[in-house]
Amino acid sequence: MSTVQEEVWEVLRKLALSSEETDWGLVMNRMWKMTRNHFLPRAALFILTGLFLAACAKEIPQPVKKPLARVEGERVEFADPKTMPALLSLVQIQSETERKARISGRMAWDEERTVRVRSPFAGKVAEIFVQPGTKVSRGQTLATVFAPDFGAAQADLRRDEAEFTRKRKSLERVRELHDHGVVPHKELDEAEADFDEARSEFERAQTRLKMYGTVGGGVDERFALKSPLGGVVVLKNINPGQEIQADANGAPLFVITDPSSLWVLLDASENDLAGIDPGESFALSTKLYPGQSFAGVVEHIADNVDVDTRTVKIRGRVSNQQHKLKADMFVVAEVELPPARHPLVPPKAVVMIGGESYVFVGESDAVFMRRKVQAGLEERGMVPVVSGLTPGEKVVVDGAIYLQQLIQSSRQKP
């Protein structure tokens, strides 16, 4: 190495060792002047800079990083709570945990107070007397229909009535003649049999028309659709002049119900069934009325699980005096369940190792102990711990996997 190079090297080394906060701009400036004054090639500047950095890396001691946590067996201890990762969070175990099941569902008409009106006769709509929202009483006429089949039933009644009257008068004459010995007893028996047959046909025709809400009258083919119960017309699928069919499975012409009482149909998971019985009360909520709830009662729980959705149908009844709730509205029912028999922890707190369940218990603000527990099946987003935890202890929820990795890493070191 030349004298100039040795001089440059010495300047650089002294600058590097004189202070931990060396002004590298000053170093480069001096190197530039020295190479210029001694007529060295400018390429020497870059060569000497590389030599300088390599030497500094060898001569300047690097700081030793201390581990954030110390692992001893199942125990993880941080030197200072302030050095703990921000991802660590704990939850305290309670002796009795109040539980509430939130079950989604929809509102429906109360089928015990609802009727779907269809026409038993095909025909043409003549008049309509109600509209959606109209309050009706039992037996009130909703609409009239020109129905030829109904006219035939009216004609049958008139014919059977006339035949009944004729046979009755004939029986009276034969009986009178029999009493005077004019006709034999055989003719009286035949007259009585004919009268009984005519009476039966007449009563059958009367019963048929009574079933359709009509008794007697002429043959006008005008059939009156009447409401079987009192309530409110909530649906109308009929217009004047419309041709309708006598289809018992078709769309109803009118739907009448009492909207002051509604059903709620809930889809409960298998885990939600524990603690829910008929007669259990619940609170209903909907996005349409935030902060407001509606009281209801469980009336029926299905005996089977839906094979596709793995849910069980629960039917409840809800009072709807103000008519705020509507049929087919989506709702959420909140049912209070009995307190849990075992402590419950979030699923993230449980670490599975070789088929065994472990949790990290906080012994202090910076010391955590891995403990083996017996965990049950997850229920409503929580895992019951059958054994291994006591009320009042704190377990790590977020960061349990990180602590497990620290223990695993410490055991892999030579």
Image (tube, rainbow, N blue to C red):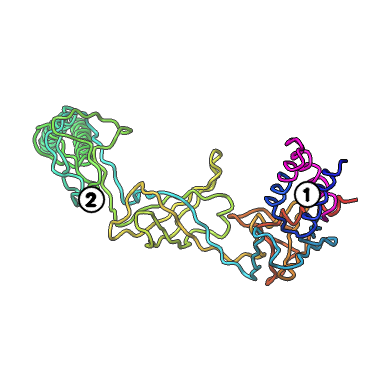
| Quadrant hosting residue 162 | top left
| SS state under label 2 | strand
In the image, what residue occupies the spot 65% across and 62% down?
A: 89
Give yes or no for contact between labels 1 and 2 (Cβ–Cβ under 8 Å): no
Q: Amino acid at mark 2?
A: Val
Q: Is residue 334 above or below residue 39?
A: below
Q: Earlier in the sequence, mark 1 or mark 2?
A: 2
Give the class, few, some or many, for how many residues have Cα within 10 Å of label 1's Cα (few <14, many ≥20).
few
Q: Which mark is residue 20?
A: none
Q: The N terminus is located in which quarter?
A: top right
Q: Position of residue 160 (x, y in %)?
A: 16, 32
Judge left or right: residue 240 versus residue 387: left
Does the segment drawn in magenta span residue 312?
no
| Quadrant hosting residue 205 | top left
Q: Position of residue 330 (x, y in %)?
A: 39, 49
Does the segment drawn in magenta span residue 34?
yes
Q: Closer to the camera, 108 or 163?
A: 108
Judge left or right: residue 226 versus residue 393: left
In front of the other: label 1 or label 2? 1
**Residue extending furthest right?**
414
List the residue tagged with mark 1.
Answer: 355
Q: Amino acid at mark 1?
A: Gly
Question: What span is colored magenta in the figure?
Answer: 33-61
